[in-house]
Image: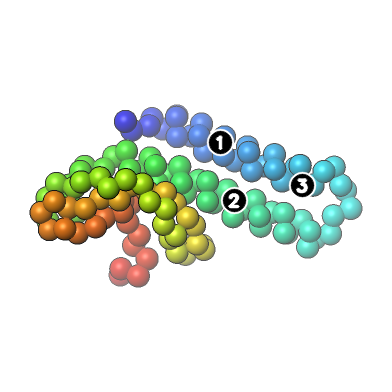
């Protein structure tokens, strides 16, 4: 069932809050952090938050899957969830997505698909 915009926003805010709390715990009240230490902490937060938000967006987009093959229009059979590393313009993320196989043409499909390298 598709999420409402408000439900998706609440889940994304929850992910951000978890990551920020983790950063603050890591900081531990220290006021003597070097710029390098700050940058490392923020970089870890960025990677963790990007990963979590990407997964939420993938899950939201999958809820809108039509069940039809984008190649031939045939019916898709769900083969279960699979983890997959995806290279994006901002780095690599690992997302869990449903894997589908077309009953008619046999094509495999992981929605949502990447457009990187397709132009």
Q: Nearer the viewer, mark 2 or mark 1?
A: 2
The answer to whether residue 98 is above or below residue 63 is below
Q: How many marks?
A: 3
Q: Secondary structure at mark 1?
A: helix
Q: Where is residue 118 shown, x and y percent of the image? A: 30, 68
* Earlier sequence position, callout 3 versus callout 1: 1
Viewed as shown, does residue 106 lie left or right of 26?
Answer: left
Q: What's the residue at 38%, 30% (across, down)? A: 4
Label 2 sits on a secondary structure element that is helix
For the residues labelled 2 and 1, say whether their Cβ atoms are less than 8 Å apart. no
- Whichever of callouts 2 and 1 sits on the residue coming sooner in the sequence is 1
Left or right of residue 7, residue 18 in this image = right
Mark 2–mark 1 Cα distance, whole angstroms, equals 14 Å
Query: In what element is the residue under mark 3?
Result: helix
Q: Quadrant of the N terminus?
A: top left
Residue under pointer 3: 26
In-image side of 60 versus 25 (left or right) = left
Classify mark 1: residues with Cα within 10 Å, few (<14), some (14-19) or many (20+): few
Residue at left offset 21%, top offset 53%: 101
| Whether residue 54 can be seen here | yes
Identify the mark nearer the N-term, 3 or 2: 3
Q: Can you name the residue that lies furthest to the front here?
A: 79
Residue highlighted by disc 2: 48
- The residue where tag 1 is placed is 13
Q: What residue is rendered at 52% in x and 38% in y?
A: 12
Question: What is the CA distance from the residue labelled 3 to the residue labelled 1?
Answer: 20 Å
Crowding at dot 2, Cα within 10 Å, few <14 / some 14-19 / many 20+, comes out as some
Q: For the residues carrying marks 3 and 1, which lies nearer the camera in this image?
A: 3
Image coordinates for residue 44, horizontal then vertical, percent: 66, 55
């Amino acid at each position: 069932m598709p999420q409402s915009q408000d439900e998706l926003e609440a889940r994304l805010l929850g992910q951000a809050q978890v990551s920020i709390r983790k950063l603050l715990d890591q900081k531990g009240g220290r006021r003597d952090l070097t710029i390098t230490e700050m940058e490392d902490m923020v970089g870890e937060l960025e990677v963790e938050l990007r990963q979590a938000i990407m997964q939420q967006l993938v899950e939201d987009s999958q809820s809108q899957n039509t069940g039809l093959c984008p190649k031939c229009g045939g019916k898709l059979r769900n083969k279960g969830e699979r983890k997959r590393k995806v290279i994006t313009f901002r780095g690599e993320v690992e997302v869990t997505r449903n894997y589908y196989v077309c009953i008619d043409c046999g094509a495999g499909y992981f929605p949502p698909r990447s457009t990187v390298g397709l132009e």
